[in-house]
Image (cartoon, rainbow, N blue to C red):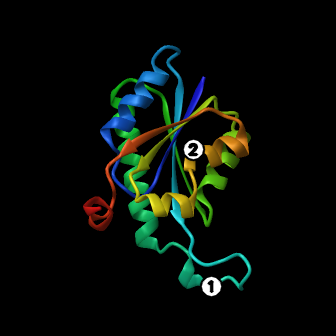
Amino acid sequence: RILLVSIGGAPFQTEVVRRTVALATPEHAKITVLGIARVYGTSLGLPHPGLKPTMREWEEQRNVVNDAANVLRSRGFEVRVAAAKSRNAPKMIAKWGRAKNFHAIVLADPERPSWRRKLEGDLTHEIERRCGIPVHAVPTPALDRRSRAR
């Protein structure tokens, strides 16, 4: 079995580690940690270098992914790391899931206000719809202070 752990730019949450270890332990799965850097703007306009991830954002993404991989390696798993950039993160995760034949996807699902959930859609459902692989979303605390206050 192969397991994909997808994370954003936030530090790796312990709840996500627990869920990943719980899913990977029975068959001692190989794990790939995928970090996705955000590309801003729309695909309709001309490409603009200011909308792509900066070197600092790439370095931050690499550090988060490597930290996550080290935590999982310390638990005795074989871990690979990867990074990608995308405007649409669920689409990229689904593409990776299909292309590499993953058996499950585990990802952090930060809490968001209800209006934002309606606007952005359900991340888990979007990925499952696109690739047909079971997605295990682990609820985590909000990333910014403003969404935690509501």
**Relative to the observer, which residue lies in front, 102 or 56?**
102
Q: Quadrant of the N terminus?
A: top right
| Vertical order, 125 against 1 (above or below) | below
Q: Residues within 10 Å of mark 1 (few under 14, many from 20)?
A: few
| Vertical order, 58 against 134 (above or below) | below
Q: Residue at x 44, y 30 (%)?
A: 20
- Name the kind of residue labelled 2 in the image: Thr
Q: Nearer the viewer, mark 2 or mark 1?
A: 2
Which picture quadrant has residue 119? bottom right
Instruction: Give the x, y percent position of residue 123.
Output: 56, 50
User: Circle 2 — which element?
Assistant: helix
- Name the kind of residue labelled 1 in the image: His
Residue 71 image label: none
Name which of mark 2 and mark 1 comes first in the sequence: 1
Residue named by callout 1: 48
Residue 124 image label: 2
Horizontally, residue 67 falls left or right of residue 100, namely left
Q: Residue at x 44, y 26 (%)?
A: 77
| Vertical order, 111 against 22 (above or below) | below
Instruction: Give the x, y percent position of residue 5.
Output: 50, 40
Q: Residue at x 66, y 77 (%)?
A: 42
Residue at the top extreme of this rendering: 26
User: Circle 1 — which element?
Assistant: loop
